[in-house]
């Protein structure tokens, strides 16, 4: 091909026939090359779209192995509704007598129970009932002491390796933020605790595993933990499986959001204050602009 600057200086009438044919063939080759690039780009984009579609379908197939928990009507889901504090107290009892053997609550201290589910004296008694490792002392040794309100809930295991060794290789997760860590929140917790059943035909579980359709894959390392009348509530509430699952789900909801009630209380106060200030601002605006909006402009011709 000739540069454009050179072609502009050549008189088209003086260009020979072979030269014209060469230029035409070059332009045709360049156009075909561009066409091949466009076709290659289209084919590449289509292949990428097909790959993304296949990946999405594979994800959907994997997600079908887990049953989505139904939505339950909890008493605290209303705009102005608070958590059921009696249920929180019962849920703590379920956690203490059942769940605390394997699961920890690293972000909850005994002082957090004061004014929520227990009085200060009750919370102190609960803290003093456990021994906390402290130290070192004057001799550089660690020692055991009764717990205080400022202490966090004790952990069931010293480290993750000990936890795995005691649970057939499975690591029990911490439950402090479990309500937010699982899609569905308390709906998932309740469904998981009450959803144990026999594995359907065609599914074989390894030793030490149980079947729960609400758990990813169906095979869960935690066996069923709740059974009717396995504990006795302090307030006389019947300890059925559904009742205990509901109470511990509400308790874990509170563990995830200890300031759940406070946020709603502050939001209500904020809306009331803003509504009052909005009325004052509207009245001030009407008063301030009333002079300008009610004035009358009149033209007075000059006096001759």
Image (spheres, rainbow, N blue to C red):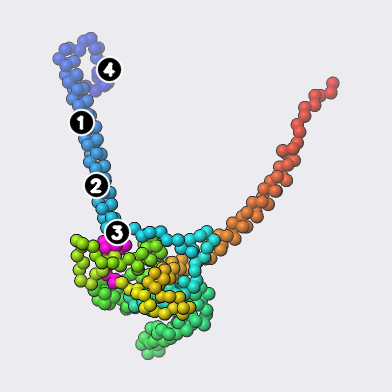
Q: Nearer the viewer, residue 72 or 18?
A: 72
Mark 1: secondary structure: helix
Span colored in magenta = 213-223
Query: Is residue 229 something one can see in this rendering?
Result: yes
**Residue 8 numbered tag:** 4
User: Which residue carries the number 3 mark?
Assistant: 66
User: Which residue carries the number 1 mark?
Assistant: 36
Q: Nearer the viewer, residue 34 or 249?
A: 249
Query: Is 182 drawn above or below residue 169 in the view shown?
Result: above
The Cα atoms of the two marked residues, 2 and 4, are separated by 54 Å
| Image quadrant where one finds the C terminus | top right
- Horizontally, is 16 left or right of 213 in the view? left
- Horizontally, is 282 left or right of 65 in the view? right
Residue at 38% x, 59% y is 70
Query: Is 163 drawn above or below residue 36 in the view shown?
Result: below
Q: Residues within 10 Å of mark 1 (few under 14, many from 20)?
A: few
**Residue 54 numbered tag:** 2
Mark with earlier residue (2, 4): 4
Mark with earlier residue (1, 3): 1
Query: Is residue 136 something one can see in this rendering?
Result: no
Give the image location of residue 168, x and y in percent: 24, 74
Mark whose residue sits in front, 4 or 3: 3
């Amino acid at each position: 091909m000739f540069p454009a600057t050179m072609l502009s200086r050549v008189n088209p009438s003086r260009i020979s026939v072979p030269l014209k044919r060469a230029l035409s063939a070059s332009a045709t080759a360049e156009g075909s090359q561009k066409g091949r690039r466009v076709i290659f780009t289209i084919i590449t984009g289509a292949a990428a779209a097909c790959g993304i579609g296949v990946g999405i379908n594979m994800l959907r197939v994997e997600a079908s192995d887990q049953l989505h928990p139904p939505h339950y009507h909890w008493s605290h889901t209303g705009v102005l509704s608070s958590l059921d504090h009696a249920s929180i107290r019962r849920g703590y009892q379920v956690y203490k007598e059942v769940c605390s053997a394997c699961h920890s609550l690293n972000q909850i201290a005994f002082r957090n129970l004061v004014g929520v589910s227990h009085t200060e004296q009750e919370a102190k008694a609960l803290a003093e009932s456990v021994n906390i490792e402290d130290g070192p002392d004057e001799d550089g040794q660690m020692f055991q002491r009764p717990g205080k309100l400022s202490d966090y809930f004790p952990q069931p295991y010293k480290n993750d390796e000990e936890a795995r060794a005691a649970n057939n290789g499975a690591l029990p997760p911490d439950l402090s933020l479990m309500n937010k860590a699982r899609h569905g929140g308390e709906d998932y917790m309740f469904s998981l605790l009450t959803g144990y059943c026999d594995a359907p035909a065609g599914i074989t579980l390894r030793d030490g595993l149980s079947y729960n359709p609400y758990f990813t894959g169906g095979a869960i390392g935690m066996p069923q933990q709740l059974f009717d009348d396995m504990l006795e509530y302090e307030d006389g509430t019947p300890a059925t499986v559904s009742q205990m699952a509901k109470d511990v789900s509400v308790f874990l909801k509170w563990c995830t959001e200890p300031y759940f009630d406070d946020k709603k209380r502050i939001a209500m106060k904020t809306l009331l204050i803003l509504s009052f200030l909005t009325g004052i601002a509207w009245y001030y605006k009407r008063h301030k602009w009333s002079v300008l909006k009610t004035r009358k402009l009149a033209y007075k011709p000059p006096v001759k």
